[in-house]
Image (spheres, rainbow, N blue to C red):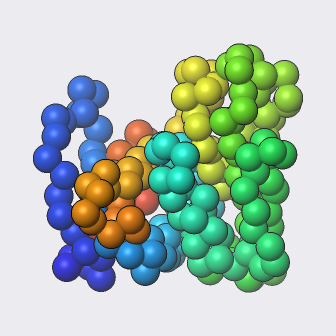
Amino acid sequence: MESGLHVTHIVGTPDPDGADAWSARWSSEDDTQAFAARLAACPAIAHATLALHGNLGAGKTTFVRHLLRALGVRGRIKSPTYAVVEPHSAIDCPVMPAGEPLSIWHFDFYRFNDPREWEDAGFRELLASAGLKLVEWPEKAAGLLPGIDADIHIDPDVNPLSDESVRDVRMVARSLTGQRLLEAVRS
């Protein structure tokens, strides 16, 4: 147990670009919630773009729901799978000045067939706007996405004898903002 999270470091090869990374094993949804709460407490989250990686059912949207709740989003939080983007506003967000809401954009590019579709839809402007951007299936935009601050990889344990809620998680910082978020997760 490290910092309130069940942590088992994942053995693997270092990132070729030398990026700083953190890894853990979530044994329950409580670990997902604790990770989300750590990110939500970091002021850098208010201006971050996070790329979320993982197969269908990996837990990306579950993580987003916990993060948005920790940031103060009220009401229904639904997956943007069919809408492609879901806008949210966090009122009384702990990292924002009093009375100033945090704008959040949750993208899901799963249904895209051509990387140019996200630009044709006008998403470049949204991704350049102030606020938090969460991007599921970023690879469907094939490198056209501007400035990812951190990649979060969520992979279910594939052992059929293990609990289905176990996830291997890895976060890689890609910018100074991503580094600040990584430091918050490690604290």
Residue in view at x 24 percent, y 26 percent: 16
Residue in view at x 74 percent, y 46 percent: 81
Going by the image, does 77 lie left or right of 69? Answer: right
Q: How many marks?
A: 0
Coordinates of residue 82 in the picture (x, y in percent): 81, 45
Going by the image, does 10 lie left or right of 135? Answer: left
Coordinates of residue 163 in the picture (x, y in percent): 33, 69
Say above or below: 157 vs 100: above
- 101 or 1: nearer the eye? 1
Coordinates of residue 7 in the picture (x, y in percent): 22, 69
Most extreme residue toward the front is 161
Which quarter of the figure is the N terminus placed in? bottom left
Q: Is residue 47 visible?
A: no
- 158 or 109: nearer the eye? 158
Going by the image, does 69 lie left or right of 27? Answer: right
Picture quarter containing residue 129? top right
